[in-house]
Amino acid sequence: MPSDDAFSRYHPLVGLCYFALVLGLGMTLMHPVCLGISLAGAAALRVRLGGVRALRRGGAAALFSMLFAAAANPAFSHEGVSVLCYLPSGNPLTLESICYGLASGAMLGAVLLWFVSVSEVMTSDKIVYLFGRAAPALSLVLSMSLRLIPRFRAQAAAVAEAQKCIGRGAGRGAVSRLRHGAVVLSILITWSLENALETADSMKGRGYGLPGRTAFSTYRLERRDAAMLCWCALCAGCVVCCVRAGALAARYYPSVSLGEGGPLAAAAACAYAALCLTPCVIGCWEDMKWKHLTYRT
């Protein structure tokens, strides 16, 4: 579902640039400090957008991915100089493979949490606004992909509730739950096919694909949007410059080696934390301003 948070009300270009920077840095920086900051920022944004319950739902999938990656890497990668023991297959279990598995799992979990927030902040109308003129087919595919899973989940919950109200809810046994799930899935497939036909007719009726077709938009790039773009570029530029200078370097093969700390590493960590926590800080600041105004009135 689309979010009504303060950060979501910025210009779509701000959201696109912010998530591109956060995801790009999150998939590049493998230092444990950066991974922890990325995880904390992604989790804080999930709580900000959907509450603790949303974090539990998204965090369960992220935690499973983290554990799977952390366990799979030592099983398939046997590089490293610190041999802890030998597996029954005769391959060595190294400390470096375990550390890299934990790091890659943390990176994967953070990226998954960021992508969940992307689907709520970057709604379909924003995607169409950003890419509708340059790549209309790409914008349509992206917007439909981002809204597919949330719509399916909402429709599945509505169908399950309707089945329960007419006395056809899921029973206690495993077989009964499987039958109920099959019925819900069948209804969802029928609904999706009908919805696809209705969408195609609606697009045809609105002149999609015709030359000269225009699109209505209420987005305007204001001063606060330009200031936010400059802030994101400043934070990301500081992180990139510090990393290129050797701060927050991490190496896991053939031996674990983390870059030395110092003012440069502290500056990079602070800039990265400021970038990841920007939406939460903006939302909290807007809430404080609103509470102050309502208190005065």
Image: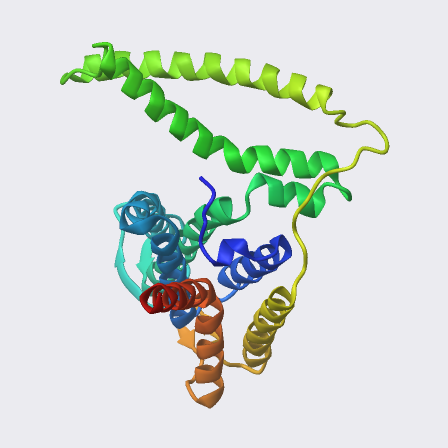
Instruction: Check the image and tell me how it is coloured.
Output: rainbow
Q: Quadrant of residue 257?
A: bottom left
Above-or-below relation of 25 to 259: above
**In x, y percent, where is residue 113?**
41, 51
Residue at the bottom extreme, as displayed: 263
Q: Residue at x 23, y 16 (%)?
A: 164
Residue 199 locus on image (x, y percent): 61, 21
Q: Which quadrant of the rendered structure holds the N terminus?
A: top left
Furthest residue toward front:
297
Q: Can residue 134 be seen in this view?
A: yes
Q: Residue at x 31, y 43 (%)?
A: 57
User: Count the marks: how many?
Assistant: 0
Q: Residue furthest right?
A: 211
For image coordinates 50% across by 49% down, the residue present is 121
Residue 146 place in picture, x, y as percent: 53, 38
Q: Can residue 71 be seen in this view?
A: no
Q: For the C terminus, which image quadrant?
A: bottom left
Rendering coords of residue 189 (x, y %): 46, 15
Q: 113 or 203: nearer the eye?
A: 203
Above-or-below relation of 39 to 54: below
Residue 236 falls left or right of residue 163:
right
In depth, the one of 217 and 121 nearer the eye is 217
Give the residue at x 40% y 24%: 155
